[in-house]
Image (cartoon, grey):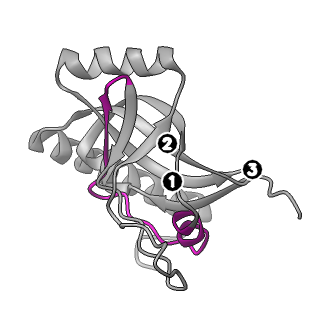
Amino acid sequence: MVKEEGRKLIAQNKAARHNFFIEEVYEAGLVLTGTEVKSLRAGRASLVDGFAMVQDGELWLSGVHIPEYTQGTWTNHTPRRDRKLLLHKKEISKLYGLTKQGGLTLIPLSLYFKDGKAKIELALAKGKKSHDKRADLMEKQANREITRELSRRTSGKSERN
């Protein structure tokens, strides 16, 4: 059997960077069943409602939707079950302290295969207020207009073209 190499993206939480300030990013392994892995290999998952929490010294991922495997039988998994995340004990205790401190939460940014193993990118994040989101959107729009104007000037086109 050929060993997989590299990184294959399965799902991304694009809204996370819009709704949260990202403080730190961690990579964690996932404890999955066979049908979950097959469903992920088919490229099916949703991180939209996902979050992570520390319970009894272990890190758990909740709200992530991995649909049932279509060729699965009675051994199929439940799509929204809690899944255990694999991190070092030190990292888990650090995350527990930071999330209990208040204002911070753990959210999944992306789900991918790295060298054949399922990994999730978790972010320690703080929620944005609506005025922060508006400011970010205005900044993105201004940057887009600046780059558009610069590219127009360097290509030598006039305003009427």
Q: Which mark is residue 115?
A: 3
Question: Which residue is at 26% across, 40% downward?
Answer: 20
**Image quadrant for the N terminus?**
bottom right
Work out whether 35 lies above or below 62: below
Location of residue 148 with respect to 109 vertically, above or below: below
Residue farthest left in this picture? 130
Q: Residue at x 53, y 59 (%)?
A: 33
- The magenta stretch spans which residues? 35-57
The 10 Å Cα crowd at callout 2, few under 14, some 14 to 19, many 20 or more, is some
Provide residue 27's location: percent of width, then percent of height. Answer: 54, 36
Determine whether the residue tagged by mark 2 lies in a helix, strand or loop. strand
Could you say which quadrant of the image residue 23 lies in?
top left
**Secondary structure beneath label 1:** strand
The amino acid type of the residue labelled 3 equals Asp
- Residue type at mark 2 is Glu
Measure the alpha-carbon separation of dots 2 and 1.
6 Å
Query: Is the Cβ of the residue at disc 2 closer than 8 Å to that at disc 1?
Result: yes
Answer whether residue 39 is magenta in the image. Answer: yes
Left/right placement of residue 95 relative to residue 63 reads right
Q: Nearer the viewer, residue 39 or 139?
A: 39
Image position, residue 79 (x, y; %): 36, 67
- Of 109 and 160, nearer the camera is 109
Q: Residues within 10 Å of mark 3 (few under 14, many from 20)?
A: few
Q: First in sequence: mark 3 or mark 2?
A: 3
Look at mark 2 in the image and give the residue it sits on.
121
Amino acid carrying label 1: it is Leu
Residue at numbered disc 1:
111
